[in-house]
Image (spheres, rainbow, N blue to C red):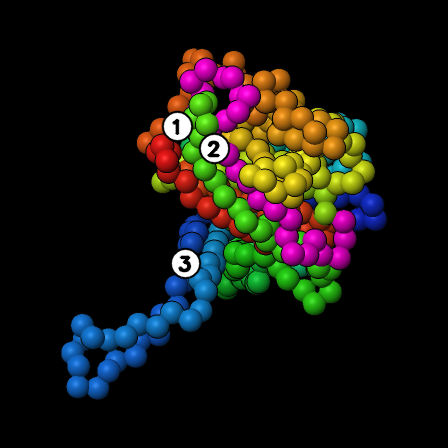
Amino acid sequence: MATIRIYKYLMIGADEVVYRYTIPNLESMTVQYNTPISPMPLPEEDADENVLVKIEGNSASIDIDWTLADYEYTTGNSHFQQWSSDNDDSETLDPVTEDSRGKFDPIGLTFRDMDEPTGRSARQIHMFRQFFESKSIDNDYLITVEDDSTGYGAASKPTRWYGSISQMSFSISGMSPIVWKARIQFFVGNVISVFDSDSPESPQSLSAVYKTDDDVTGMALGTRDVIKVRFRDPSSFGATDVNKAIISYRQYGKLEWTNVTYDIATTVANGAVNKLTKVNDSGADHEYYVIYLPPNAEGTKGNDNYGGAANGAANSLTSGGLWDKTAYASASYTLAGEKYEVKVHFRNTSGDGGLSEDTVKMVSP
């Protein structure tokens, strides 16, 4: 049986808070993807000549129906839980760094039962109104589905949809006066408000190129093959200082993205771990950010990166980090013949910026 959870992110003063609800007694969950197409039949022509016009983007919605039930409230079994950045467990809430972007990544955090006992159905309805209603432009929502014990779909890597709840409804009938039916309607996407500050534009001149060891000067990594990713600053960084560059990639045909995040904030010293600086690449003087994929392991950033030394003066290509072949069981790691998708975006304090994307096939040029 799949485990379905709803998360809500908000700010309370200077603290970040995430509420989590685990759905019991599931009746149905419907995920609907919409691809609007307008038919324009031509006169004097048969159906094969029908002109199909696509002038709108796609959308997705999720409907979940379940039954509320009274349950014995004891510590650790509440359906309503929360996490706060002022907890004493020293956990931090990271931004999302994958293709499905949002303001928060709550997976793996330590959630605690909310203070209010929630064993009664009527009280659960009030909890939804009080804690899960969308009230602010800072609110962000996430639905996850855990349907496997390992790999993609496991508790540590659930299927995710970011967006916002558009409707919550609760009903009871005379035929069943003690059983409440619950339903939410959820739209997938990014919530945009006229009050939002500007976020960065898309990175410019993104390219992803397959490279063998012989193609990369100074790499000296035996038979290690890599993907060289190069990109430039966007045309605008938005209203606030940009602080992160996020690179996501996955093998073509797979679901899960692997992510690497770098600091590019001016407050981080050149040469610091995870500090990405511009370098002189292909004759362009210190205009490009350049990294190599894949990293040591999922979620790691490596000890150094291309241009990580002071002022981007050195490449540090043999010092470990993203291209450390010792992280693999074999000294030989080849990507030849495979295809990968690569996406890059910048983040500032207002949120995620626009995406740039590229697909690379690992064949020698």
Residue shown at the point (44%, 62%) measured from the top left: 58
Instruction: Label 1, secondary structure: give it.
Output: loop
Query: Which residue is labeled 3 in the image?
Result: 33
Label 1 crowd (10 A; few <14 / some 14-19 / many >=20): some
**Residues packed near mark 2 inside 10 Å, few (<14), some (14 to 19) or many (20 plus):** many
Instruction: Give above or below for 209 relative to 195.
Output: above
Query: Was residue 5 drawn as part of the magenta stretch in this picture?
Result: no
Q: Nearer the viewer, residue 202 or 297?
A: 202
In the rendered structure, which disc, 3 or 1, sits on the residue that comes first in sequence?
3
Residue 335: give its label.
Answer: 1
Callout 3 crowding tier (Cα within 10 Å): few <14, some 14–19, many ≥20: few
Q: Residue at x 83, y 48 (%)?
A: 13
Residue 158 position within the rendered picture, expressed as x and y whole percent measured from the top left: 50, 37
The quadrant of the rendering that contains the C terminus is top left
Residue beneath label 2, please? 227
Q: Which residues are magenta?
A: 216-241
Between the C-alphas of marks 3 and 1, the distance is 33 Å
Closer to the chain start, of discs 2 and 3, is 3
